[in-house]
Every structure is written in structure tokens, then in C-alpha cells.
Amino acid sequence: MKLLKLSTCIVLGMGPAAAWAQDLNATEDFAAESVFLGTIFVSAPLNPEAEDGVSITSEALALSNPADLSELFAAEPTLSVGGGIPVAQKLYVNGIEENNLAISIDGARQNNRIFHHNTTTLIDPSLLQAVRIDPGVAPADAGPAALAGALEYETVDVADLLDAGDDFGGSFKTEYDSNGDVFTNSLTTYAREGSFEALAFARYATGNNRTDGNDDTIFGSGTNLTSLLGKFAYEAENGGRFEFSLEDVADDALRPYRANIGALIGGRPLPETRSYDLTRTNVSLEYTTTAPTDLWDPTLRLSYSGTTLVNDETDLSTAQYTEGETTSLNGEVSNTFALGMGELNAGVDFFNDETDISYELLSDAAESYTAGEELSNIGVFAQLRGEPTANTRFSTGVRADFQNFTGLDGSTQSTNGVSFNASGEVDVSNSVTIGAGYSHVWGGIELAENYILNPAWDYSTDEIEDVTADNFYVAASYEMGSTLFDAKVFSTEIDNSRAASYRGGAAVTADVEATGFELGVSTTWESGFLRVGYANTETEVNGLSADSFSGNYLTIPLGEIVTVQAAHQFENGVIFGGNIEHALDYTLTDTLYTSSVDIAGYTVVNTFLEYSPENIEGLTVRAEVNNLFDEAYVARATYGQDFAGEVEPNFEEGRSFGLSVEYTF
């Protein structure tokens, strides 16, 4: 087929793009691990020579040219992002909050449960080459505590950007967004000399407060984002490859006092905004080989990740200063063995996570305190993947984890447990594929959020219970020419999830359940594609319908979501496309606080035009209109909209016009 050059590829494990992911070589190491029905793979494959299917390719990651998480996952109805502003955004996978997934960036474990009013994983999509999500059922080598699946971010490498035979390149991109007068500039340079590679990326975005669809100012929505990425690699003649990466993303601006809430109605008087200075850092050193054998295909990794949040209120009426930090030192030693029926990845991983808070009350030093918890884990795992016949594929694994926990009072607790998983699929015919998966996950002890740590907690009165989870899905697809129909039913149950609170104590737990189903249809033609997805997700906390308060770090009310994504390339090279998200009205019943509450639906439309003139090599111009019809709405996964009269939730931005110019050399 004719190559379709678009600004991104979103490869959904249940759409026709799943085949694209397996056909394209640029990301095969990241994508090829059991891309079963239900696996979600978001990528920017860089293989313009691919001829099987439609290749959607460029240096950007998504059709929406994503600036944040909500735009990155806009095309998938089972992935929900709410919060209104990037510093408050949280991702929900099949209805479960991302803290319950094993999250990694370039293989480095993330430990980001710092403050329930701000985002979990602050990330700049401009840095990314690929994202892989295993909803619910995750492999044993995805890491410990994959209670509701696994989420892997992979940042861009030199090999993703530099053409064969070239030794130097780069790009400069400048962007403008009319809503808030947001200006963004980014510069990327990369080089290859003999066995050495190097890459440097920097992006800086600034802007004023935005307005919503009612033309009201969204207080605390200004832009002040800095992101940096540096990579250095050496590849020996025998194929041994060493890679060092350093990534840093920082957001520093005035935000709503509680960043994920516009305002509380009533309650104690508080400033309208305060400073949120949030920085996330990721450092990783990894050894792999580009010349594996049947018995030697290793991964050796040592990583550090950390997130720091500072709220400086010393000049406000609250007269206080709070600094929270979460860190993780983690690593892995593993090897993949080629077997007759597939391959076995086995190894050991570890982490040492810490969470610390420092609070100063200027008016009363006696109320100031510092506190922290620590958790260490050693895991042993094995995951077997294979294709026993031409039309069947499977993946199954087991891991054992051993933990030591230290409370803020110095008390200790040790525990251990076993997790296992199994998934697979079979081609019933040339057109029909069915698949299923199940996992039981032992998560052990979870660290409490920094901002609710209480020096008065007494761990001796209540032992913290181990958290466990059970996940299940059944999926099917039917291919009819260039059209694919798909369906999936899923369920996640988490028992004894730690729900500690400042006044409630260190050992409070909650049980969580998310069930639902999704339907999709996708079709491709010579110069474009169309996908429509539908998801219906119901969530519970402790046997009652989930609300956004009791669901903190756990889940959120979602209901029914419909997404549409399409793009077409014309003969002159112009690409036109966009996406639609439609949330249906949702009546939430039988929660902890109310018998019935209505949550309003909405429809938001985003569209773009992109053009790369043939007579100016390397130049790409893009114009876009986001929220085309100026819808005034609150994203379904945003906190507080189920507490009408008590909470003013964060609204999403109204209509905005964007223009970007990128030159690649």
C-alpha cells in the first residue's frame, strides 16, 4: 500500500494498527513481546520502507501532537485522563488509577505517589518514542506490584531519529497556542560516531492562564514547563551495548490551591492559588546486546527515579512551607533464553523506595515536622512466551517478591508473596481471533502518600495488610478485508489496597473493583484510516459505587466513553485528521455519600492540517484547532464533578488555535 505519512501512530492492540506494530521494525524490540488482543501500544515507528498495511510515521507521537497525557491517550476509550491541567492529570487504565500499575520510564521503576492533588507521573510526550500498556494482565518481567497491569514509557533514541549512513542531525520546533498565548520551543540534536551515540533534547513552554468553553478564566492554568533529555550510548564490536540516559521534567507555576480542584465551596478560607514546583528526574544505566544468541540475551539495568514537590506559602496567609520527595533506586539482571517453543526471560529485580515529607508552619514551629517511610523489595521472575502452532500464541509467568518495610516511627515489617499470569490467543480462522488472560498479583505493602504522613501514626496497633489483585479479560476480533471489529470484557479486583489517611491511620485499606467492556471498529484505505471505540466501565470501592473522593489513588466514576480518530493524506501531501471524545451522561448511584448524582456528558472535537512541502526538505507546518466547538466541559476522569454544590472541578480549556513549524536537518 501507499505510505501514509502522518504525525503519529497510535497502535492499539485491538485495532488494525496492532498489525502495523508487528510489521514495523523500528520499535520491534519494544512492541514484539506478546502484543496480544488488549495490549495497547502507542508508537512513532520510523520505517518508511514498510509496505504491509498503512504506516503512520513521523517524529511526533500522536495525531493530536500531544502536549500532555490527555492528548497522548485521546484515541483509546479505556484510557481516561482527567485533571484539567498537566500538573493535576492522572491516568486511569480500565478504570484503575495508574499508581496501581507497574510504571517504568526507560526501564526505571517510578515511585510517584507524592500528593493526591497533583499528577502521578509528570511526563512530556515530546520525549517519547513509544508507550506500551498491558491493562490488567501484565507479564512477570514487567516488575513488582503490577496490580492492574503495566505501563512502560520509552524515550527516543538516536537510532529512532538518524538515518542509516548519517552521523549528525537535529530538529528545531516552535509552537503557538492561542488559548493562553502559550509559546513552546524545542531543540533536539543527535550524533553517531563509530561505536558512540549521543542525543540532547530541550523543550521550554510558557503561557498565561487559559479560558474554558464559557470564556471563564481557568485559574492556575498557566504554562511553565521545562523538559530535558540526554542519552549517551556505546556499542562494542561484539554487540554489547551500554546506554546512559538522564531525563528531567519540571513544572513551576501558580496552581489552584488544591491543584486538581478549581475550588471548594465553603470550608476554611484559603488562598485561591499557591506555588506548585514539581520536578521528576529519571537516571538509567543499561547493558544489552544487539547480537543475541540462544543462550545470551541479557538486560542489566541500574536506575534512579525521583519526584520532588515544593509548595512555598511563606508569603501567603497560610504561612507554611511543604516539601515532599519520593525516590526509587532499582535495577534488574535478566536473560532471555531461546527455546524450541518460544523464549524464556528469567531474572532478578530489586527496588528501594523512600517517601519523605518536610512541613514548616511559620506561625507555630511546634507544628512543624519531618516524616518518611521506606520499602525494599527483591523479586525473582520468569516469563515464558511462545507460539506452539502457527495460529496460537501464549505468555505465562511467575514471580516471587520479598519485602521489608520501615515505618516513620522506625518500626519494621517483612512479608513475601507469589504472583502468576497466563494469557494467549488463537486464530480460529483467517478472520477470527480470540484471546483471554488471567493474573493473580501479590503487591505486598504500599508506601503511603507523602502529604498525609502523620508523625503520630502507631504501626504497632495495626499491621499493614498485603495488597493483592486478580485480573481477567476475554477478547475477540473479526477481520473483514481492510475493516476490523473487536470486543473485550475485562475485570480487575484489588483487595486491601492501602488507603492510609492523616487522621485515619497508617493501616486503613480499601477494596476496589473495575469491570467493563469495550467495542471497536477500524478501517483503513490507501491514504488513511478511521477507528471508532466504545467503552463502558463501572467502578466500586468497598462494595459501593466509586466516587472521586473515596477513589483517591484507586479509581474514579467513568461510565460510557466513545472515541473517534481519523486521518487522510491527499495527493498534494497535506494531511487532514482529528479525533472526537464523547462522554455520555452518567447517573452515579449508591455511593458512600449519596444515593444518586448526575454527571454531565460532553463532546469535544479536535482537528488538524499538516503539510511538508517537497521543495523544502525537513520542513513541517501544522495548524490545529482543539475543542473546535468551544465545549464547556469537565473531563470524565476529573476529580470532584460528582460533588455538585461542594466542589468546583477543573474545566478543560475552550477552543484554541495552534500553529507549529518544525525543521529537521
Image: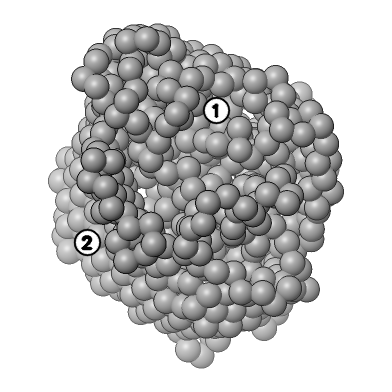
Residue in view at x 80 percent, y 52 percent: 600
Compared with 154, 204 (above or below) is: below
Q: Is residue 116 above or below residue 176?
A: above
Q: Nearer the viewer, residue 447 or 249?
A: 447
Rendered residue at 59%/59% (across/down):
262
The residue to which callout 2 is attached is 198
- Residue 593 image position (x, y, % from top left): 71, 33
- Secondary structure type for disc 1: loop
Q: What x and y, as percent, mark residue 99?
A: 47, 35
Label annotation for residue 148 = 1
Label 1 to label 2, Cα distance in Å?
36 Å
Query: Which residue is at the front of the view, 654 or 13?
Result: 654
N-terminal of the pair, mark 1 or mark 2, is 1
Number of disc labels: 2
Residue 65: which numbered mark, if any?
A: none
Question: Residue 448 vs residue 269: left or right?
Answer: left
Horizontal side of 272 relative to 78 (left or right) equals: left
Q: Nearer the viewer, mark 1 or mark 2?
A: 1
Residue 490 appears in the picture as rendered: no
Q: Amino acid at mark 2?
A: Ala
